[in-house]
Amino acid sequence: MAESPDIRLGLYVPPHPHPLLAPEQNEGWGRLRDAFDTCRQRIEESGADLIMIYSTTWPSIIGHQIQAHPSPVFTHVDDDFHFLGSMEYEFKMDAEFAECFRDCCEERGLQARTVAYDGFPIDTGSVVALKLLNPDNRIPACIVSSNVYSNRAEQIVLGKACRDAISNLGRKVAVVVVASLSNRMFTEHIEPSEDRIHSAKDDEWNQKILEFFEDGRLEDISQLSRDIQGQIRVSKVVAYKPAWWMAATMGQHNNYEGEVLAYEALHGAGGAVIQLTPSEKGIGDKEFDEDDVEHYHGDRGVLDKGMI
Amino acid sequence: MAKGEIVLGCLAPHPPHVVYAENPEQNEPFSEGGWEALRWGYNMLARKLKEVDYDCIVVLTPHWQTYIGNHFLGLERFQNISVDPIFPNLFRFHHDIKVDVELSEAMQRSAEEAGIVSMMMRNPDFRVDYGTIVSCHMMNPDWDKPIVTISSNRSTHYYSDEVMNEQASALGRAVSKAIEESGKKVVLVASHSLSHRHFVTEAPLPEDMSREHIYNHSQYVWDMKVIEMMREGKMKEVIEILPEMIEQTMAEAEGGGLTWMMAAMGMPDYPAEIYGYQSVIGTGNVIAAWDPNSATRALVL
Ligand SMILES: [Fe+2]
């Protein structure tokens, strides 16, 4: 294996379009927007030459899909928040990295493919993140999907495959995860001024997760992923996957400087902009309950056993 | 004005594979065919529709997913390319869709009056989802009738399958009332599969039918049970056991389509017309229709 991957920083940002399309309508949305703007500067200052995005709003079924169109252009509209406006985009993708990431996935036993089609529907979360973090396309990007059926082992291996690709090509990377904390939204229309976290329980859990982030305890959050899913995630998918992928991609430890730049409600969901910077001064590793895994072996025919 | 009516209800699954396999000029990729049991079934249903007098197709689709109630298409025309986010290799479809905005607004008003959270979608850049496009293309490849798409509220995920059943039923009743008052003849479409566990790998040639089969036998047994009940005209019972089926087979009915359509049609107690059943990338798909007119209702398969 090549030398250890050069990851300059990690960001955790929310997927909703409000900070992009309507930051003036609610002070909290405005603060999230300011935090995105700060992160844009931080990425520039970091010297990163690749923005690597994992988006929870891009589901996939045939393994893991990786965006490889060198310059995707389209106008995106969100399914729920279409009334906030359209999101025109033209991005610059690192197709070479996408191909390498795909190869690294396959070497670790994952099903993966690149997609490079005119008019491919890039998801709301990725569009929001790229438009705010990289408005001039100064830095090429890559986006990887979130497989609807994947669970922990697969996400961890996906993160490791991403590290392999970063090392192989010697990229200097800003890792970006696009995900809510608590993800329960209000199911009715609300005035922007009425936005708040959906429940006190969601808010308490979010605050606890933010404490972990501030202490740089990314691997601990990854280990807590199943609890987080059970407590504050609507069961849209089988697991809370972004922390697994982020921790695996960034090295599976707790040694980061953490900074919460903003935490606000987005139609009831918990939206946070968080920066993690690799550091010698982290909190160190606690005991971990969950196994580590290097290679993905699929469902190992579990479903075939016991068939008549 | 004569009372409007629902002249046909169709369960019309939307794997993009069936459009891909038909090679219509609107779709960019080329195929060597595949999934004939479904495609030929759809061809038969399309022929029946040619004989039906109707003004508009109303579709409830699980691929326009909304968390804030149900949304209704609210502009007259949508011209765009639809690229399937899951199977972009199979479906890149150029479309020109006409919408019956008057009926759409009437249904949304009726939903609102019934206390259902709802909204019109008026953004001209909005892309109509591929579920709508696949079902409508297979049922009416001439695209010579206006449509309305209604989004799928994610109440199954936010609450439970039972809550979904209640909410989708209320929406069905509201839509039925609006259709009656509109004086129009309407075809309803629930756009979805039955069992819905996919393979996570794809054959090098996706239409290689030597690779196609149901994901597992349990899915098949559930699909057959429900189809048998459809033949027997037991739709109230089907809707009642739907939560269990959804839980055990990940059935795409979780988006509310079948419940909505059956509630709008008063829970049919007459036999469904069955046009075909086949698996697509492991999922179970039936094409079925409910014809309220006993004179034209047929035993198809
Ligand atoms: Fe579907």
Image: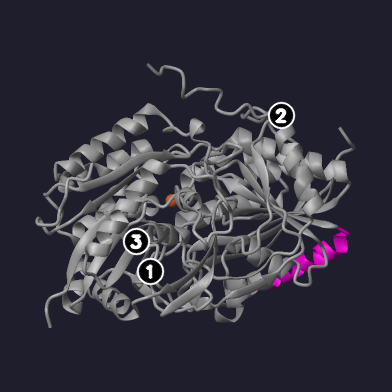
Secondary structure, mark 3, is: strand
What range of the chain is rendered magenta?
A34-48
- Horizontal relation, residue B48 to residue A190: left or right: left
Residue A40 belongs to magenta span: yes
Residue B269: x %, y % from top left: 11, 49
| Distance (Cα) linking label 1 and label 3 | 20 Å
Residue placed under numbered mark 1 in the picture: A188
Residue placed under numbered mark 2 in the picture: A294
Q: Chain of mark 2?
A: A
Is the magenta region chiefly helix, strand or loop? helix
- Horizontal relation, residue A61 to residue A132: left or right: left
Q: Residue at x 47, y 59 (%)?
A: B130
Q: Residue at x 51, y 57 (%)?
A: A203
Quadrant of the drawing holding the C terminus of chain A: top left
Give the mark toward the camera: 3 or 2.
3
Q: Residue at x 29, y 71 (%)?
A: B56
Residue B283 belongs to magenta span: no
Residue B174: x %, y % from top left: 22, 68
Q: Is residue A142 above or below residue B36?
A: below
- Horizontal relation, residue B49 to residue A179: left or right: left
Q: Are marks 2 and 1 on the same chain?
A: yes
Residue placed under numbered mark 3 in the picture: B60
Q: Amino acid at mark 1?
A: Glu
Q: Nearer the viewer, residue B291 or A273?
A: B291
Secondary structure, mark 2, is: loop
